[in-house]
Amino acid sequence: MDKIVLAIVGLAGAGKTEATEYLLKKTGWPKVYFGQAVVDETVRRGIPGEAGERAVREEFRAKDGMAAMAIANMPAIKSAFENSSVIIESMYSWEEYLELKKAFGENFKVLAIYSSFKTRAGRMANRPVRPLSESDLQSRDYSQIENLHQAGPIARADWTIENEGSKDGLYKNLSELLNNFKF
């Protein structure tokens, strides 16, 4: 396999951002952030900020369903994929997964980062930006599973890395993945 489109998935606090940043440094692949299409549209309309982003996100989903972020970002993904493997940040829904699978077939891969609720709760409580209590994290988990259909891509991941320990342990597991699978 020459190139892949790699989506990194997991619940809040699992370590998706750490994994993404590490893989970007190690591979040099470009990243497509699914939220960028929303940000770009709010800037184009002159309505930046959370309220504007929420309105645009809901508008996208009203038009294209739960695959909306994959559809909105498809031109950027295809453009980047012409020359390189690509990392996708913030893919959530089963419908987005199906849209990318349809577009890229066997070149679309998913890496799930898994951490227990207890581990994630500890991380989220101590997060310097937007910390979450255990009850807030549980509510977010339920919402993302029920409303964003986030469990499907995690369950169908091509690879799963357990992230219960240190960042160094996560990096070691990611390095092993890169060494074992030549992309």
Image (cartoon, rainbow, N blue to C red):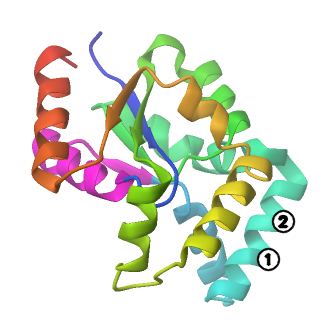
Tell me the element at label 1.
helix
Kind of residue sitting beneath label 2: Glu
**Residue 55: which disc?**
1
Count the labels in the image: 2
Q: Quadrant of residue 96?
A: top right
Furthest toward the front, the residue is 118
Residue 28 forms part of the magenta stretch: yes
Kind of residue sitting beneath label 1: Ala
Magenta-tinted stretch: 15-32
Q: Which residue is mark 2?
A: 59
Tell me the element at label 2.
helix
Residue 149 forms part of the magenta stretch: no
| 183 left or right of 100 in image | left
| 30 left or right of 114 in image | left
Coordinates of residue 33 in the picture (x, y in percent):
46, 56
Coordinates of residue 56 in the picture (x, y in percent):
75, 72
Q: Residue at x 58, y 48 (%)?
A: 73
